[in-house]
Amino acid sequence: MNRQRPFTKLKNIKDASKLPKEEKVKSNTQVTKVLITGGCGFIGSHLSRALLEQGVSVRVLDDLSTGTKNHLPHEVELIEGSLLDKDLVAHSVEGIHICYHLGAVASVEKSITNFSKTTAINLLGTIHLFETISKLSVPIPIIYASSAAVYAGYTKLPFHEDLSPLPSSPYGADKGAVELYAKACFQTYQIPTIGFRFFNVYGPGQDSNSPYSGVISIFCDKIRKGEEITIFGNGTQTRDFIHISDVICYLVKALEFPFHGCQIYNLCTGVAISINQLVDTFEQLLDKKIFRKWVTPRKGEPKASLGDPRRTIRDFDIKPQCSLEEGLKTLIESQERNLCV
Ligand code: NAD
Ligand code: UD1
């Protein structure tokens, strides 16, 4: 079995430690209470737990459309409702030092089939938050979720942060527009922001039951049930899969950020994994044959997605640690645990 760390494959990319250090993170330890929009979702609930462990109080605003209260530790204050409710958004930011904005319809497909409804949440919902924060006597920093979907129109790999959004879906356009509004809000209202362009995040707690779920959670669930998995296209398409534990390390570290503008960072590993490789890795780990069915490729989806992680590694001083093998093991183990309780 290949037990290499993911970063052994970064050899072709210039070592992050050799890049200039002027933007290196300084400490900012005044944070005691944060708001997480979308805190009942996959990433948000992991983040809530991690922040509580750091001694930070957590408030969540979530409409429970895809998230669930069951994922949330009881110490978290939950405000149940939508980003579209301006009064509720205003109430949610009271007494908050930093806002993590993760609340969104997190699906390219839903944004295509339900265009205006999705955009209302992903873009207008975000603007409600920005507007509310602009009215505070001192605007609080916002750490928000952008997406690798903003790179959909590019083919030259890896994607780096200096590329302007070139989306090919309403979802990608909303995330790109949020980045633009973040810039405008810094210029106009001095709201400091960090936008993280998440690549393909996976790990325990990710929903596997929706057609919009991530490929790893779908495969893991089907393999456990002994069902055949479906591969769209020939399986040579690649993605940059990042484990939730690495994502959370960066999001927590972002609390210490000096917040002096409107920065954009990739959250990725810099390692491309094909869908066929992914299934092979599951087979090796479980030591069993997985039945595969190949169907026509999904319309319009990128053949390859790979992020350049160097700027994020340099400025946050953390490298992603979790290899695909280790990450898949955490998923398999968490499924086994859930079956035993
Ligand atoms: P998720 O669906 O598990 O979480 C999103 C949360 O937002 C859910 O709890 C949902 O109930 C909540 N929400 C939706 N509409 C809302 C509204 N109108 N008001 C308040 N809350 C609302 O998705 P996730 O994977 O945890 O994604 C979190 C963020 O990261 C999203 O912004 C998503 O676009 C972004 N992102 C995720 C990935 C990934 O691979 N998971 C990749 C790129 C970007
Ligand atoms: C993902 C994110 C999206 C994000 C985008 C950024 C998820 C669910 N979606 O989309 O939020 O904005 O990256 O680029 O994480 N596949 C199969 N069989 C399946 C399911 C998927 O072969 O049963 C293939 C897909 O065709 C695709 C790959 O697996 O090539 C990854 O699919 P998916 O997990 O849905 O993520 P993205 O489409 O990359």
Image: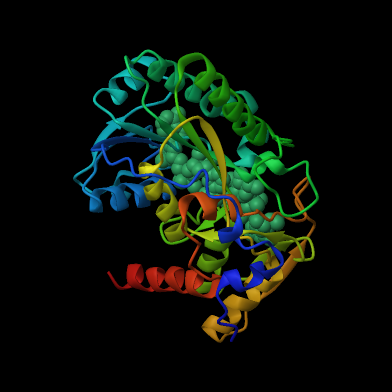
Regarding residue 294, the answer to whether it shows in the image is yes
Residue found 51% across the figure and 43% down from its top: 23
> Along the horizontal axis of the image, is 186 left or right of 253?
right
Q: Nearer the viewer, residue 28 or 185?
A: 28
Residue 217: x and y in percent read 52, 61
> Along the horizontal axis of the image, is 14 left or right of 30?
right
| Quarter of the image with the N terminus in it | bottom right
Residue 160: x and y in percent read 68, 47
Q: Nearer the viewer, residue 269 or 187?
A: 187
- State which quadrant residue 109 falls in: top right
Residue found 42% across the figure and 31% down from its top: 142
**Number of numbered discs visible in the structure rendering:** 0
Colouring rule applied to residues: rainbow
Residue 77: x and y in percent read 23, 36
- In the depicted structure, whether residue 71 falls above or below residue 99: below
Q: Nearer the viewer, residue 165 or 79?
A: 165
> Along the horizontal axis of the image, is 202 left or right of 164?
left
- In the depicted structure, whether residue 96 falls above or below residue 25: above
- In the depicted structure, whether residue 178 falls above or below residue 58: above
Residue 329: x and y in percent read 46, 74
Residue found 30% across the figure and 25% down from its top: 92
Regarding residue 211, the answer to whether it shows in the image is no
- State which quadrant residue 333 falls in: bottom left
Residue found 78% across the figure and 41% down from its top: 153
| Quarter of the image with the C terminus in it | bottom left
